[in-house]
Image: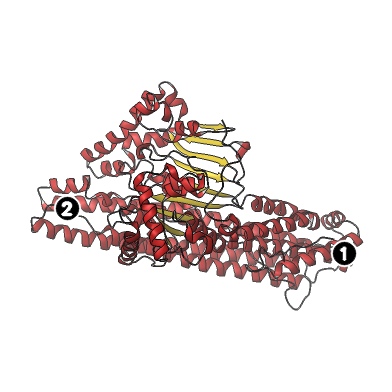
Amino acid sequence: MSVPTQVPVHRLADPKFLFSRSHETKVAIEQLRSITDQMEKLVVPDAVDRTLDMQKRLARFKTRISLVGQVKAGKTALANAVIGRPGLLPSDVNPWTSVVTSLHVNAHRPAGKAAIFKFFDKDEWADMTTMGGRLGEIAARTNFEDEAEEMREQVRELQARAKARLGVNFKLLLGNTHSFDEFDDGLVKRYVCLGDDEETGNGAGGRFADLTKTADLYLDEPALPLAAVVRDTPGVNDPFLVREAVTLNNLADSDICVIVLSAHQALSTVDIGLINIIMGLQHEQIILFVNRVDELDEPHRQIGEIETYIRQTLKAQKLPLDIPIVFGSAQWGEAAIAGDLGVLSERSRTAYEQLQKARAQDVNVMPLTEGIGAVSNDLSGISKLLKVIDDKAAQDVSWPFLESMRDECLDLVNQSIVLLQDAVDDQSSARSAMSAAEVATRISEIVSKLNDDYDALTQNSLKVTTFAMSDVYRSFILNGKRDLEKAIDKGKGLKQWSPDTETLRRELISAYNDFSNKCTARLGQILQDAADSIAALYADVLDREASLFPVVGPSIGRPKTPVFLMQTMTIDVSAGWLGRLMSKQRKKTTALTNFEAVATEEMARTIQDLQQDYIQDFATQTRVELQGFVNEHIKTLRNLAAPVDAPEVTQMRQSFGLENEISHRIAALDRIRDTLGGVTPDDLGSGSIAVSAR
């Protein structure tokens, strides 16, 4: 039942060309893994666990790519084409039952499993079916009971269908996980897509899909040099919103987001969901892929018009204009990879021939496909997309990771050299220029300042960001009430009235990004101050005029992607039940009061999410990392300051081995340090960081 391991690889261009940057990264990772293997035998015993942890992180490094977009944009077919497995995932499934499906390529397999399917737990299911999800909950809180019941009824349809399919097994599945050693398309369909009863035999084809929260499939692909996970997500304009939170939460830990558009509806200004996602992501994360050009009547002419329209929309939304845009057809890509263009429809073949002819006459017919050699002849756009992903992954994902690992290796090597050198340099009882008590006092001062600075940063971030977002909401409510009042006075139909949520969201995201940028910058200063203080203490302990080496702190990431600002707000659906609600109000004051109630409830939730799930979580996680960094150096400094005849020092020195052996280890670590110190992005993959421990 397993997927064959030998399958057609990308036939659209030479994989070595498509993934040239990834090949360099792979070599660099292997070289760093070789160095950490050597370090395991050379560093002091207390540093071995950290070395082993680095080995695991290097072995499990992967690029995380999410495909998001409109319903029926062709994300699933694109996912198949990206990993070179045409037909692996079923396309054109009912969006109500779509599941976030992660394709782990060349990645570590938990317990050796090839397929893992997780179901919603009881609390998640109860929240959806009892309250009608988040929108129903807010509707109920603001006394819009009719609208809340409408939301609940939509989700009850899902519940009824699931119970009819699963019978007594329904409750038993909630919160559970199904895993398999192998999988085929039939197994995948049972968990990720429903289909029509007539097609699947009374719904058996999608037996578990209603309850499935996520699906993880593991496979190997020799053509892809590095491990990656490609996530296929439900359409963000799914009107039911049942799985929106799952989709957005997956974006929070994605490195690259490919936003898939349909050539028939390429980033329409009414597609709020996609605009929200683009606003919330970092610029370097985003790639736009305009799919289904095979369905255009005159693709050779329309592609240029669509690109112009997208650029104008980005400009109107005050979004970056240099976001990469790739045009193509996932169907063409799947057919080309499988080596069978004969499966295309007559219309699709006609469009393909039109583009081929136009390409022969005008090399600029497909934007962003020129100047990259072999991929310029691939009309499916898959090769270009892979090349853009490869370049973006190297610059914004792989190198920052490798740089962080390099710095951590240097820090660990430096600490070990200091301890080993101290063991052979001075055998007197007064080996340290400072007493243990003096060192303890200095350490206490460093830790105290670090904690005080960090507490001040956290509290200031909470205060300033909460105030900024509250101020944005207050302005939105004030302007919205004024515009609503004018609309009522003029007798306009309120079903068509909508508040300016685009400006609201843009300003909220701007406030969040301001917090993220300032917090990250200030945190870097705090960390550098602590590292400099530790380096100075090393110099004082060993009676040196200058620091022996620069202490390098851990690489601290940015706060999480603000998915809570991407999700659909109650005020986003003013054309739906909120609009109908407003049209029912006979009194202007009632309409204004209810609008304010909706917006105020949304403001409270936004502030709560910001404080609890973002600022506090980020503070907690970062504090743990900082404390771990400081603790490692504290241990080394205390060992240096302890009397030579102290039991712990005697035991530590005995663990180092004979003096001759220690000297060899110091020399080998010195070579590693010199090599790592010169590593730059240009050096990675060149073979220059290979080093011998002998």
**In front of the other: 240 or 151:** 240
Dot 1, crowdedness within 10 Å: few (<14), some or many (≥20)? some
Q: Colour scheme used in the picture?
A: secondary structure
Residue 277 coordinates in the image, percent (x, y): 38, 55
Image quadrant occupied by the C terminus: bottom right
Q: Residue 496: which disc?
A: 2
- 593 to the left or right of 600: left
Q: In this view, does 46 lie to the left or right of 97?
A: right
Residue 570 at x, y percent in the picture = 28, 49
Label 2 packing within 10 angstroms: few (<14), some (14-19), many (20+): few
Residue 217, compared with residue 365, is above or below; it is above
Expressed as whole percent of the image width and height from the top left, the position of residue 265 reads: 30, 53
Q: Where residue 429 sits in the image (x, y, percent)?
A: 87, 66
Residue 271 seen in render? yes
Disc 2 residue type?
Gln
Tell me the element at label 2. loop
Amino acid type, mark 1: Ser
The residue lying toward the viewer, choosing from 305 and 450, is 305
Left or right of residue 105: residue 635 = right
Relative to 266, say whether 585 is above or below. above
- Rendered position, 446 above or below 383: below
- Measure the C-alpha gap from mark 2 to mark 1: 80 Å
Residue plotted at (32% across, 53% down): 296
Tell me the residue that label 1 is attached to: 663
Residue depth check, mark 2 versus mark 1: number of the one nearer the observer: 2
Is residue 465 in view from this perspective? no
